Amino acid sequence: MHQERSRSDKLWLVLKGLAMGAANKVPGVSGGVVAFVAGFYEEFIYSLQKINKKAFGLLLNGRFRSFGKYINGPFLGYLILGMIISYFSVSKALDYLIVYYELYVWSAFFGMILGSIYYIAKDFGEWNRKYVAYLLCGIIAGVSISFLEPAKENDNLIFVFFCGIIGVSGMTLPGLSGSFILILLGNYVLLLVDSVNALYDTIVSIFQWNFSFMENPERIQLLKVLAIFSLGSLVGLVSLSHLLGYVIKKYKSATYAVIIGFIAGSLGVVWPWKEELFILSSIGSKQYDANGQAIISGYERYFPNQFSTETFIAIFFIIIGIFVVLSLDWYKKSKKSTING
């Protein structure tokens, strides 16, 4: 697992991190699915699992090289680099595309998840009643979550820490969207929009040698919220990876059956044809975030009742999404046959 990586391997890891970061930003899509389909899910989980007491001991003793080697540092480092780059590039592009081409974006993601289900299930092995039962449990859980009603926004720091632990689940649990969970908890806008914007504005102010933000209680509160959320995410990432590492080791087939079911159940969240439902105030008007965006509370899904040009284009993007995922499998097979040949 701790092999030397070529320059192309490092580039691929950064690109995989980009894909994971973009997927984590979109409600209904899971970065864990990207890790699963791209073939590095288990290495990702087992690397995170190495962040333990021994790792901190190496770090505190100044044995940085040993620490990096022990936790598979280069692998995690390139992935995290890709996620960071994604947050300021690909995910920003996705924000734009979802606003102006929402139907086609959801169609592409729907196709990618369909392709992912096939990709993961094809190598599962023999299905029996027990594994079908686990599969159904995963589907029911995924569908149930997709129809829950969102809570109200809450900036209590203890709750924000809890949101961090739960929100990071999309990176470790394929099919469970961390962004969508944050919507259900009522804190998506607070944690992934307002607090991030506050950090960006603060960085710009510091570079301009302007420290007036320190007298702005609202800005300071948002920075505290982001710091606590980040800490909760780190705790959640490490603790969930330990739990998942153990479960995969002991009950691999059962775990994969549940994951396949969960991904299938999440299809309802990314169903392309849906109308947005907004959070309303007591007098019935929409509520807005700090950027003037209406806050979405959920979706009303429907089947297209006519085959318009828009519908055909959406179906085309579903096919493109499926093709993108399956092309990874074809690429792997061709690479393996080239090596063997």
Image (spheres, rainbow, N blue to C red):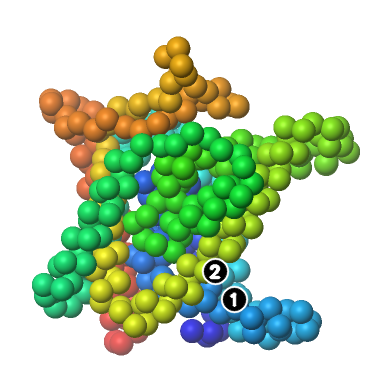
Q: In this picture, is 21 found above or below 314? A: below
Which residue is at 62% across, 54% downward?
Answer: 230
Viewer-proximal residue among 237 and 122: 237
Question: Which residue is identified by label 1?
Answer: 51
Quarter of the C terminus within the rendering: bottom left
In the picture, residue 283 is in which quadrant?
Answer: top left
**Residue 141: in sight, yes or no?**
yes
Q: Is residue 278 left or right of residue 227?
A: left
Q: Secondary structure at mark 1?
A: loop
Q: Is residue 61 left or right of residue 191?
A: right
Q: Which mark is residue 238?
A: 2
* CA distance for labels 2 and 1: 7 Å
What amino acid type should be assigned to the residue bearing mark 1?
Answer: Ile
Q: Secondary structure at mark 2?
A: helix
Which residue is at 22% across, 56% downward?
Answer: 139
Q: Is residue 213 left or right of residue 163?
A: right
Q: Position of residue 312 (x, y in %)?
A: 19, 34
Please rate how many residues cluster around mark 2, counting C-alpha atoms within 10 Å: few if below 14, some from 14 to 19, many from 20.
many
Q: In this picture, is 338 found above or below 326? A: below
Q: Please report contact status of discs 2 and 1: CB closer than 8 Å, yes or no.
A: yes
Sequence-wise first label, 2 or 1: 1
- Circle count: 2
Q: In this picture, is 328 found above or below 47? A: above
**Residue 110: in sight, yes or no?**
no
Q: Position of residue 277 (x, y in %)?
A: 35, 26
